[in-house]
Amino acid sequence: MPEDDPTLSATEELALARLALEEGDLAHAAGHVAAALVQEPTLPEVHETLARVHAASGGDLELFPLGHHAYVGAVVARAHLLAAAGRPAEGLDLLAAASGYAPGTDWAGVPWVTAPELPERLDPERTARILMQICAAVPDPVPRRLREPLRPYLTLARNAVTVHPGHPLLLGAASALARRLGEVTLAVTWASRGVRAQPTKLGEVWLGYAYRSAGRTRDALAALGRAVALDPDDLAVYADIAGTLADNGRLDEALDWIDRALARDPTFDCAVHTAHRLRFQRDGDVAHLVALADFVRDHPDDSHEHHDLAECCRSRPWLGQVTPAGGPVLDALREALGGAATPVAVRLEALEPPSAMRTAAAAVPGLAVEVAEVADPDPREPRRATTCQLWRYDGTTAAPTLPTPSAEAAQRIRQLAHPAWPHPPAAYDAAVGLATLELPDLLGLLVHPPEAPPTALGRVLGGQDPSLWVRCVQVWACLGLLHHRTDEPWDGSTRRRVLLELVWGVEDWTTEAALFALVTAAWVDPSVRPDVARVVAERLADVAAVARERRVPIAVSLAHLALATPDLDPQTRALADTLIATPTTTRPPGPLRRLWHRLRTLLPTPLRAR
């Protein structure tokens, strides 16, 4: 249901509708009424004008047509007219579709939906199906800000249960809606009554969910266990039991239930997703998540949408987000942006990555940076010979060697760059928007990042920590490189060659970004995993060797990248664990932790499917 951009107020739309009515132009009158409904769906004047248009047309519903690309205002208008014509069930079906499309709009907040006598005109099973349609279309639970527009449906449920107090399907569906809207006690009451009226598998599942939301874990497990006894072949319930046990720290029991489900059907999607999530929860081995990503790729037609992979990757370094950079020059930058007196000079014991130095210089003009010494191995030199050199040095001052990217490239990256992603394959898919950029543009973005966009997220990044925005740009530019000339076989491809040169170039944030792109390639293409695992192992071994001589600012981040790499050998995993656990490793400073907390409020939260 594509929705036009609102350009007129509801009052203006109604004025135009009345003018069109007077001229006998019913099609235009209907269009303006539909537009007014979108903006003010409960305004009495809108409904009065809708009734006038309907009467003038002789009851022609096709003034508000349905179709594959129906306008939501037309759908809602038709719903109200169907109800007025004595067909409220059909009208409720359309309102439910509108609420699924835009749950934050009060489509159902009209008298006929909440009228106590409405359920008497509806078959209780049809009412139950409508409530189930609403449940399927909204999050579980519904966020507080979205609950009020959905409460008319809860009033409908209350009225229906009053009229049909012993209908088990209606009671269960009403319980499911109440639970989603935070009415947990009512959900338990209705689901319990439904099970007493007629014990069914679905009724016990609804009761189990209600108990679980109420914090009554033992009762929830008992109800779900009864559901299994009633239908041992519904393996989704096994997964629900496992998830409930795991959420309460009973991981071994949870895995036992999943193994029982997989023994019945090793390919059942709910069980497979839950199994990999719980096994990752148990030992933290990324192999479980890679196997889950492989399963998702090979089974695109799952029974419903799952979020287990995103849930496991969320907030984890490189699996679900870019790692923030640290170091004294960035500490000074963040203090200055946080309101502290701007330092006039910063003395560094060692040279920081060129991207860090450039970011600080751009964000705090006039900042003088003194480097005490350049320790060996010299961080200004590539770790291996390269033809793709991003930086040149004048003493300890770095400057880009590449020209500024095109305006189109800057605009594309501003639209895509983001500090978080659901999981590596999702990041890869999102970066396809950069596939048509030329190689010089993609490389130029690494050293000439554009300003953050004027969005809520962009303002937070640009205003509080420009370094995080620069890292976002570099990460997504390297993901864009993965889509460069994909017709070339991997081994001799331009994308592999360029990313490898970046990985072995000057020690920089671009090293991390390029290595993440290679790791992402291994997630989405099993055939490249041995090659990528070898590169990661060699690069981490080099980091460890250098770290014995001097500090390596990107060492911990590269170690996290190693732990995210498919098919990495055990010795390299152990080395990564050692680098992360090094005593010199510190947590991000307080302001940076607070920034990430704020950023997460701007990011979508993965929801578990069941």
Image: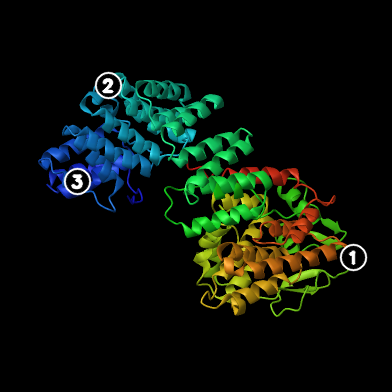
Element marked by disc 3: helix
Q: Residue furthest front?
A: 263
Q: Which mark is residue 116?
A: 2
Location of mark 1 (residue)? 373
Q: Which mark is residue 29?
A: 3
Answer left or right for 252 relative to 202.
right
Q: What residue type is disc 3 on? A: Ala
Element marked by disc 1: loop
Q: Earlier in the sequence, mark 2 or mark 1?
A: 2
Answer left or right for 429 relative to 402.
left
Which residue is rendered at x = 84% and y = 60% of the image? 551
Which residue is rendered at x = 22% and y = 41% of the image? 78
Q: Dot 1: within a 10 Å radius of its alpha carbon, few (fewer than 14), some, or many (20 or more) residues?
A: few
Question: Looking at the image, is 572 positioned above or below residue 246?
Answer: below
Q: CA distance from mark 2 to mark 1?
A: 81 Å
Q: Does the image show residue 270?
A: yes
Which residue is rendered at x = 80% and y = 52% of the image? 343
Q: Dot 3: within a 10 Å radius of its alpha carbon, few (fewer than 14), some, or many (20 or more) residues?
A: many
Callouts 2 and 1 close, C-beta under 8 Å = no
Q: What residue type is disc 1 on? A: Glu
Q: Earlier in the sequence, mark 1 or mark 3?
A: 3
- Between label 2 and label 1, give the one nearer the viewer: 2
Q: What residue type is disc 2 on? A: Pro
